[in-house]
Image (cartoon, rainbow, N blue to C red):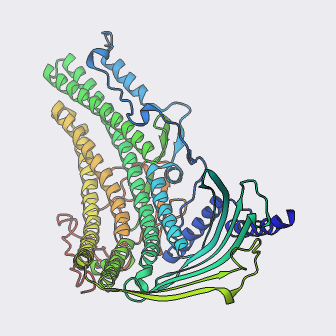
Amino acid sequence: MSHLLRPSRTLATLASALALSVLFPGCESPLRAIDRRTEATLLSAADDVGGGTIAPRLRTDGLYEGDPFPADYPERYRPPTRNPAASQLEFTPQPPREETLEAAAARIQAAGMPPAESIQLDLPRALRYALDNAVEYLNAEENYIIVALQLIIEQHRWEPRPFDITSAEFAALGQDGRFARTLNVSNDLGLTQRLPYGGEVSARLVVDMTRQVDGFFTQDGTTQGADVILQANIPFLRGAGLTAREELIQRSRDLIYAARTFEQFRRDFCFSLIRGYLELVLQQQEIANAQRQVVSSRQVDQREDALVRAGRQPAFQADLAKQNTLFAVNRLAGLEERYRVAVDNYKVRIGMDPTQPVVIVPVKLELPLPAVLASEAVREAMEYRLDLQTIADRVEDARRRVDVASNELLPDLDVNLAGVIPTVERFGTAAGLNVRPNDGIYRAGASFGWALDRTIERARYRESQIRYEQEIRDERLARDDAAVEVRSSLRAIELNRFSLLLQEQNVAIAMNREASIAAAPDRASARDRTEALDQRRQAEDQRDRAQADLQISILDYLLTTGQFRVSPEGMFLPISGLVGAEVIGTLPEDLPGAAPDLGGMTPESGMQTIPGAEGVDGDFPVRDESLPTPDPNAPAVEPVVVPEATQTGPAR
C-alpha cells in the first residue's frame, strides 16, 4: 500500500514547498518588509517634492499589537461614567489668616520663581523637542504615513497576488443502512494579476485527493488528480482603459499631496512655535517694565509720604501715590501669573510635561526688511506655495473623475478566456504532475451588456461635472486669497515698522517728561509723577510689542509667499540674501544700538532702530544717507501706496 500513497505525498510536498516559496520569499518579518517599503515610499515622495522636504520618521516601537480573540466584559458595551452628585462632593475652605500686603506679594513672587532643577529652554531646543514630542507634529507625521500605507495597499492590488487554500471534507453516503465514507483533501495554489487597462488573469494549480475510509483498503480506494487552471476576464468598453487604474493614480497623487501638506505643516508649525516663543520673551519684557514701574512708584510713594510728614504736601497726594503703587503691584502680579500660564501652555504645545520647571532664555531676531514689489511677492507666492500647487492639481483630479463617470455610462463588453489542463486521467489512482495540454479543456467567450439602466451612473456623471466646476472656482478663490494674504503681510511689515518708530519716540518723550519732573520736583504733583511712570511703562510695552511684531511680520511674509524654509531639526533656514542675527540670552531692550533721529529729544539707553534694506525698495521707503536730514516736524513715515497685482493667477 505504501507505493500507492507515495505519489500523493510527493505531490503534497511539492505544493507545500511552492506555497512557502511564494508566500515567504525570505526570512524577513512581513511587518518589517512593510515598514521598509513605507520608508522607501516616503523618501521617494520627499524627493519628488524637493526643496529640502524630509520624510517623517516611522515609529513602530510601542504600537499596540492587537488581540485576535479579546476577552468579553460588560464595560465593552456600556463604559462606566464617574459623575458624583453634589452631595458626594466636598469643598475644604482655607482657614482665615492675616497677611500683610508685602507678605502676600512676596509669596506670590516666590511661587513664580523657577526651582533649582529647572532646565534652560532656548528656542532651538524648544523646536527640537517639539519635533520629537509635540502631539501636533506626531499626528501630522502619522497622517502622512497613513497615506503612504494606503498607496502601498493599492499598489499591491496591481501586483501578482498569491493564494493557497487547503480544504478537507468528510462525507458519508448511505444506502440500505450501509454507509460509504470518504475523505477529500484539496489544495488550491495560484496567482492573480490585474491587467494595466482593466481585467484580471489568474493561474491555479488544484490538487485533489479522495480516499475511502470505510475499511475496504483496495487499490481503487484512493483517487488523486491535479489540474492547471488558467483564466482571464478583459473588459473592452465599460471599466477599460485608464479608468481601471483611477484608484491607483489617485493614491499616487495623494501621496504627493501628503508630502506637500506635511512640509507646509512643518513650516506653519515652526513659525507658530517661533511666534509663541517671542510672545513669551515679550511677556518677560512686560514684567521687567512692570517691575521698574513698581520700583519707581515706591520711590514716588516714599517721597510724597516724606513731604506730607514735613507739611509740604496735603495727605491726599501721598494717598494718590500709594494707590498708584498698589495698582502697579497688582498689575505685576497679574503679568507674572499670565506668563506662568503661557509657559505651561507652551510646554504642552511642544509635548513637554507641564509640571517640568523651565527657564525661558530670552532671544531676539534681527531680520532685515524685504525690498520687494507687491506684484513680485504675489508672483512668488503663486509659484512657490505648496498649498496652491495642491489645489491646482485637485482640479485635474476632478477632471479625471468626470472621465471615469463618463466611462461608467458605456455598455459592458467583456471577453472571457479559460483553460483547464489536467495531469493524467482524473480518476486514476495516482495522477502525479504529468501535465497533458492535449487533453485540456479550453473556452473563449464574450458578453455584451446593454446600457438599459444607467440612472445612477448618469446622476454621478452630472455630479462629477458640477464638482469639477467647483474645483475650478475654488482654485481661483484660493489664488485671490493668497494674493490678499501676501499684500497684507507686506503692509503689516510697513505698519509695524512705522509703529516701532513711533513707540521709540514715545519712550524718549516719556523719559524727557520724567527728567523734567526730576529737574523741578516742587512743580510736579503726585499725579504728574504717577502719570509719567504709567506713560513710560505703556510706551515701553508698546515699543517691545512693535519690535516683536516687526520680526514676526517678516517671517509671516516669507511664509505667505512660500519662501519659509525649515531644517530637518525644525530650525528656520534663512534664504539667500536674508542676512539676520539671533541673539540669545538677553532681552531686546538690553541690546546696544543707535537711536533714531528724535528731533533733539534724548532717547533711552539701548533704544534701537530697525535697519532698512540696501538699495531701492519699491514698497518700503528707505532713506538715502546722502540726502539732508528731514525736518523733525514732518511725519516720520509717509503713507505708502502698494501697487496692485496685475493678475493673481492664470486665467481660465
Q: Is residue 437 left or right of residue 233?
A: right
Q: Report x, y in % for residue 239.
A: 39, 82
Q: Is residue 189 left or right of residue 314?
A: right
Quadrant containing the C terminus in the rendered view: bottom left
* Vertical order, 335 against 582 (above or below): above
- Which residue shows up at 42% across the image and 62% down it? 265
Q: Is residue 472 visible?
A: no
**Quarter placement of the N terminus:** bottom right
Q: Nearer the viewer, residue 108 or 134?
A: 134
- Residue 495: percent from left, percent from top: 24, 63
Q: Nearer the viewer, residue 262 or 268?
A: 262
| In front of the other: 324 or 184 | 184
Callout count: 0
Residue at image location 25% in from the left, 59% down from the top: 499
User: Which picture quadrant has residue 504?
Assistant: bottom left
x, y (%) of residue 126? Answer: 50, 50
Instruction: Please state if 235 lies on the left or on the right of 375 as rendered.
Output: right
Q: Position of residue 76 (x, y in %)?
A: 43, 36
Tell me which corner region of the image, top left, top right, bottom left or bottom right, holds residue 266.
bottom left
- Residue 614 visible from this viewpoint: yes
Q: Residue shown at 34%/76% (left/top)?
A: 394
| Front residue (pair 588, 400) | 400
